[in-house]
Amino acid sequence: MSFLCRRLFSPISRLTTTTPTSLSRIHAPRLTSFYSTNDVVDPPTSEGEQKLVDMLKAKLTPTRVRVQDVSGGCGTFYAIEIESEAFKGLSMVKQHKLVSEALKQEIEGMHGLQIKTLIPS
């Protein structure tokens, strides 16, 4: 493990015995429900969430999207789940790049972004 990696994960590794690659599975929130862009079941709760939803709707025309501020309300870390026809035939890396490009201006002020992309069945 490199020096930088040890510094980044040392506080966490003292608490758990997991490897750094599995830490995201432990600490990242699990989003289980979507809201459809046509039928809002679980609407965004903050202005930041709503802004990201609007930007994603405009650029990727998703069938379903969910944005959640997981930074405790300060708007620096978001978890996004998005389902769109635009992802058909693309690798996961390219799908995530489309989402990142759609949110390029907003990402500059963020600490982190968790993206999960899906293709409609």
Image (cartoon, rainbow, N blue to C red):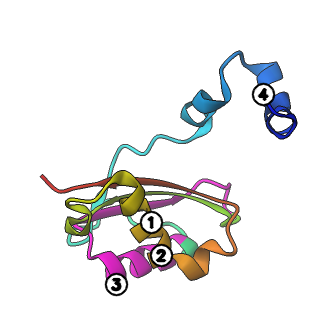
Badge 3: few (under 14), some or many (20 or more) residues near its Cα, within 10 Å?
few
Name the kind of residue labelled 2 in the image.
Answer: Glu
N-term-proximal mark, 1 vs 3: 3
The kind of secondary structure element at disc 4 is loop
Residue identified by numbered label 3:
58
Q: Report the mark closest to the observer, 4 or 3.
A: 4
Local secondary structure at mark 1: helix
Mark 1 residue type: Lys
Callouts 1 and 2 close, C-beta under 8 Å: yes
Tell me the tag on residue 101: 2
Mark 4 highlights which residue? 1
Which stretch appears magenta?
49-73
Tell me what residue is drawn at x 43 percent, y 60 percent: 96
Q: Nearer the viewer, mark 1 or mark 4?
A: 4
Q: Is residue 121 left or right of residue 35?
A: left
* Residue type at tag 4: Met
Which residue bears the numbered disc 1?
Answer: 97
Q: Earlier in the sequence, mark 4 or mark 2?
A: 4
Is there any visible trace of residue 99 in the rendered image? yes
Tell me what residue is drawn at x 70 percent, y 74 percent.
109
